[in-house]
Image (spheres, rainbow, N blue to C red):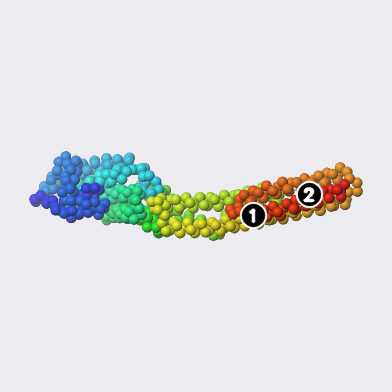
């Protein structure tokens, strides 16, 4: 048979190397994988360069009638491509085997977009060489299998890397619309990764790696979609997608078939927790979880002042920590939205502000109730001291050391009550969010303190 015409050649995209169907002389076609415009002559020039790099010269595309020569040519070509493939796999694992596939705006990705697209291009180069110069020479399914296996493996790797490339570009977007378009494009290429793995299985190629590629393609497709939903301001849908990602990547981790899955699993775990964390914070605030323990100490006596202060301080610290947690989550969302505050963030901030303000008011009410209870307890304890002093006075026929000792004990208790009350009230008042009217409590306490001193002195005189 005569030499094939150029229109039968599978030409590559000049940017990513993916095969462009129906690119014939005189046409310009956009690559469906990376959206790059390709002219026939640019693409043909790249194909010829690759062919010379791989085989040392332009291989013939004429059909070889002699089956022995055809078989030898096919084996020779696939062996050369196999050597290049092995070196490429080793290079890929060494350079990129310890980094996640998907890039987000939350961290600096360890590779440049150019490094990733060039790696994808190298895999696509082998795939295109197989399609043009090896697979046409295979006439039986057994002859086709080695070439098909390498072809689909390269296609899966390439689509995964190109998807990764688009997430890198998306993570550095200027706005959310650009990010949405790029993450959507990444999702489409991750789907192609899964599709190629599925096609390989349909060709009866027995290699468990294609099961891994299929699961990874599905996982990263959902991952990119989740990030695109965040770009569109829909974190609830994103959480559903990302939960699916975690489940799929867990399968890979359990099987131990791809070490990079664990890196993405960890990364997506943080993202999938964001929206539920906001919901948990809102639930805690609505239920007043942080204030529950505080309620248990507001009726304690003045002797428990240390416990009261510790609980009130811990409660306030808990409210502040909740604010820090929420602020941290909002900061993550802002980063995911490239510094923009979308409507869902504003809405969450308003809800949080309303709920937290209510909690602070309730906290201050508990403080006031605690202070009032301490003052009541102080008055009650003072009256108990006065009552005991009256009993001492009534029982004292002759003043003596025993009477003095009893009076001294009552005086010590009265002093202790005063020394405990004032700093306790000051500390509690300092914990309030709103200015509690300290003057009102001082006006209530001061006359009673003066009166208690006078009453005690009177009781002492009666006792001696």
Question: Which residue is disc 1 drawn over?
Answer: 437
Drawn side of residue 112 relative to residue 445, left or right: left
x and y percent of residue 141 in the render? 21, 52
x and y percent of residue 463 in the render? 86, 48
Q: Which mark is residue 153?
A: none
Distance CA(mark 2)–CA(mark 1): 25 Å
Q: Is residue 150 visible?
A: no
Numbered circles on residues, count = 2
Query: How many other residues sit within 10 Å of disc 2, few (<14), some (14-19) or many (≥20)?
Result: some
Query: How many other residues sit within 10 Å of disc 1, few (<14), some (14-19) or many (≥20)?
Result: few
Q: Residue at x 59, y 54 (%)?
A: 434
x and y percent of residue 181 in the render? 32, 55
Drawn side of residue 447 relative to residue 237, left or right: right
Q: Residue at x 13, y 48 (%)?
A: 61
Q: Residue at x 31, y 48 (%)?
A: 165
Instruction: Name above or below for residue 54 compared with residue 339.
Output: above
Drawn side of residue 43 relative to residue 257, left or right: left
Q: Residue furthest left?
A: 2
- First in sequence: mark 2 vs mark 1: 1
Q: Is residue 436 visible?
A: yes
x and y percent of residue 30 in the render? 22, 54
Q: Are the two marked residues, 2 and 1, in contact with CB atoms closer than 8 angstroms?
A: no
Q: Residue at x 73, y 48 (%)?
A: 418
Query: Foreground residue, 400 or 211?
Result: 400
Drawn side of residue 260 relative to residue 327, left or right: left
Question: Which residue is disc 2 drawn over?
Answer: 453
Secondary structure state at the residue bearing disc 1 = loop
Query: Foreground residue, 147 or 103?
Result: 103
């Amino acid at each position: 048979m005569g030499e094939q015409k150029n229109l039968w050649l599978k030409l590559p995209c000049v940017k990513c190397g993916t095969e462009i169907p129906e690119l014939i002389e005189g046409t310009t076609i956009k690559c469906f994988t990376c959206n790059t415009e390709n002219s026939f002559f640019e693409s043909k020039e790249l194909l010829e360069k690759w062919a010379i790099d791989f085989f040392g010269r332009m291989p013939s595309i004429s059909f070889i009638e002699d089956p022995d020569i055809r078989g030898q040519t096919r084996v020779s070509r696939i062996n050369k491509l196999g050597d290049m493939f092995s070196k490429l796999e080793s290079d890929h694992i060494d350079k990129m085997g310890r980094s996640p596939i998907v890039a987000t705006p939350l961290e600096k990705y360890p590779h440049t977009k150019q490094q990733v697209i060039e790696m994808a291009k190298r895999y696509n180069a082998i795939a295109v060489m197989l399609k043009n110069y090896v697979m046409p020479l295979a006439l039986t399914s057994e002859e086709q299998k080695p070439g098909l296996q390498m072809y689909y493996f390269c296609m899966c790797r390439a689509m995964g890397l190109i998807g990764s490339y688009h997430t890198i570009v998306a993570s550095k977007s200027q706005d959310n619309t650009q990010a949405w378009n790029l993450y959507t494009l990444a999702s489409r290429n991750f789907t192609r990764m899964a599709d190629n793995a599925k096609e390989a299985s349909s060709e009866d190629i027995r290699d468990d790696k294609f099961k891994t590629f299929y699961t990874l393609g599905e996982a990263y497709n959902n991952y990119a979609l989740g990030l695109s939903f965040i770009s569109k301001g829909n974190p609830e849908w994103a959480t559903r997608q990302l939960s699916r990602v975690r489940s799929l990547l867990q399968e890979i981790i359990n099987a131990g078939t791809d070490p990079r899955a664990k890196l993405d699993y960890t990364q997506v775990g943080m993202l999938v927790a964001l929206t539920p964390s906001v919901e948990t914070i809102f639930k805690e605030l609505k239920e007043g979880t942080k204030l529950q323990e505080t309620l248990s100490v507001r009726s304690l006596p003045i002797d428990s002042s240390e416990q009261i202060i510790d609980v009130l301080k811990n409660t306030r610290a808990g409210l502040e920590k909740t604010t820090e947690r929420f602020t941290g989550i909002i900061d993550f969302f802002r980063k995911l939205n490239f510094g923009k505050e979308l409507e869902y963030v504003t809405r969450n901030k308003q809800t949080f502000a309303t709920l937290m303000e209510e909690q602070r008011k309730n906290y201050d009410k508990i403080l006031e109730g605690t202070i009032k209870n301490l003052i009541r307890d102080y008055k009650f304890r003072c009256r108990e001291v006065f009552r005991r002093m009256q009993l001492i006075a009534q029982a004292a026929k002759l003043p003596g050391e025993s009477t003095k000792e009893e009076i001294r004990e009552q005086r010590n208790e009265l002093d202790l009550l005063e020394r405990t009350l004032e700093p306790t009230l000051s500390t509690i008042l300092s914990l309030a969010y709103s200015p509690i009217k300290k003057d009102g409590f001082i006006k209530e306490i001061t006359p009673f303190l003066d009166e208690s001193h006078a009453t005690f002195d009177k009781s002492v005189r009666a006792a001696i």
